[in-house]
């Protein structure tokens, strides 16, 4: 199983892990600020996503599988340590990795975390299955119909739908993304929120406010910052579009955090 990896820049390594249904493009959204500032930035498409191969079997999209892929990326790039930046699914993956192998991290960035290491809510499963069914049946159009109108303020809806369509069109293996949609939300990344209390890695938590991004509750990010001993929290100003969506501003926040730590 080959993973598509892109590398730019020289210096201390920063490894990017994207969210479910996204690709490596949707972490820093095209910003090159970290490379220009002296960092070696490595992004990869998760198994089944983007240009990466599907998993060897449809159930192999558990967080344990994703953590092993991240470990493999570090090994194959010759990295003993790295800064890990994860968004949503990637945030849970990098957090699970950090809790299992903290010696391999220089710092951790959690962008819009939504995972507390708890058993998934069964009531949410039909929504994910409907997205997978739509994607399998009618491709991107079926996925978009199943997704419907996002439950956010009207001024954000067009932007969300446009970005979602663009990223869904980047997948070579939509059937693999559908398999991931069925498995990842039912998977548990780590052993409950108490696990966060023992993480000693410098951590930046990037929150989104609920008006634009209710799938990644602001309260979850605040709890991450409260529990992780060396954590900082940043977010956009109330009423602004999420910091996590703006690559240049997000990169500046990450760069400032790394300079402090």
Image: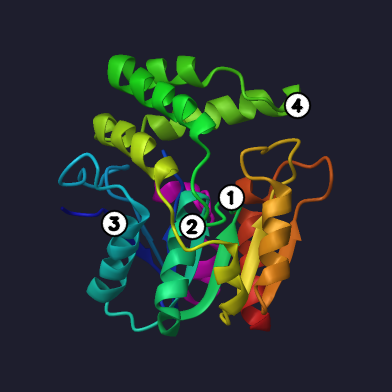
Q: Which dot marks residue 92?
A: 2
Kindly indicate whether the residue at mark 1 contacts the one at mark 2 (C-beta within 8 angstroms): yes
Q: Is residue 189 left or right of residue 148?
A: left
Neighbours of disc 1 within 10 Å: few (<14), some (14-19), many (20+): many
Residues in magenta, as a range: 23-39
Most foreground residue, 184 or 33: 184
Query: Is there any visible trace of residue 14 in the rendered image?
Result: no
Secondary structure under tag 2 reads: helix
Most foreground residue, 62 or 169: 62
> Of label 4 and label 1, which has the lower sequence position?
1
Report the residue marked by disc 3. 65
Query: Is there any visible trace of residue 224 in the rendered image?
Result: yes
| Front of the two marks 4 and 1 | 1
Kindly indicate whether the residue at mark 1 contacts the one at mark 3 (C-beta within 8 angstroms): no
Q: CA distance from mark 2 to mark 4?
A: 27 Å
Q: Which dot marks residue 114?
A: 1
| Front of the two marks 4 and 3 | 3
Looking at the image, the residue that sits furthest to the right is 238
Q: Is residue 48 left or right of residue 81?
A: left
Does residue 45 belong to the magenta stretch?
no
Q: Which dot marks residue 153?
A: 4
> Of label 2 and label 3, which has the lower sequence position?
3
Q: Is residue 130 left or right of residue 108?
A: left
Q: CA distance from mark 3 to mark 1?
A: 19 Å
> Of label 2 and label 4, which has the lower sequence position?
2
Q: How many marks?
A: 4
Secondary structure under tag 1 reads: loop
Does residue 25 belong to the magenta stretch?
yes
In the picture shown, does residue 75 fall above or below 88?
Answer: below
């Amino acid at each position: 199983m080959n993973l598509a990896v892109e590398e730019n820049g020289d210096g201390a390594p920063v490894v990017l892990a994207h969210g479910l249904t996204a690709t490596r493009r949707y972490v820093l959204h095209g910003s090159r600020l970290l490379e220009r500032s002296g960092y070696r930035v490595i992004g990869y498409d998760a198994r089944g996503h983007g240009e990466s191969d599907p998993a060897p079997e449809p159930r192999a999209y558990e967080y344990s599988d994703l953590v092993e892929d991240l470990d493999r990326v570090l090994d194959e790039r010759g990295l003993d340590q790295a800064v890990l930046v994860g968004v949503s699914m990637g945030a849970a993956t990098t957090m699970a990795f950090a809790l299992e192998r903290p010696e391999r991290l220089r710092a951790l960035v959690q962008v819009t975390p939504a995972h507390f290491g708890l058993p998934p809510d069964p009531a949410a499963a039909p929504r994910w299955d409907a997205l997978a069914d739509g994607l399998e049946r009618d491709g991107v159009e079926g996925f978009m119909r199943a997704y419907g109108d996002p439950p956010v303020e009207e001024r954000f809806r067009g932007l969300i739908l446009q970005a979602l369509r663009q990223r869904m069109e980047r997948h070579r293996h939509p059937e693999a993304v559908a398999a991931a949609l069925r498995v990842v939300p039912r998977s548990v990344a780590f052993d409950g929120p108490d696990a966060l209390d023992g993480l000693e890695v410098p951590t930046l938590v990037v929150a989104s406010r609920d008006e634009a991004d209710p799938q990644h509750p602001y309260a979850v990010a605040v709890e991450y910052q409260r529990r992780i001993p060396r954590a900082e929290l940043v977010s956009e100003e109330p009423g602004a579009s999420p910091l996590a969506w703006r690559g240049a501003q997000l990169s500046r926040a990450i760069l400032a955090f790394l300079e402090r730590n």
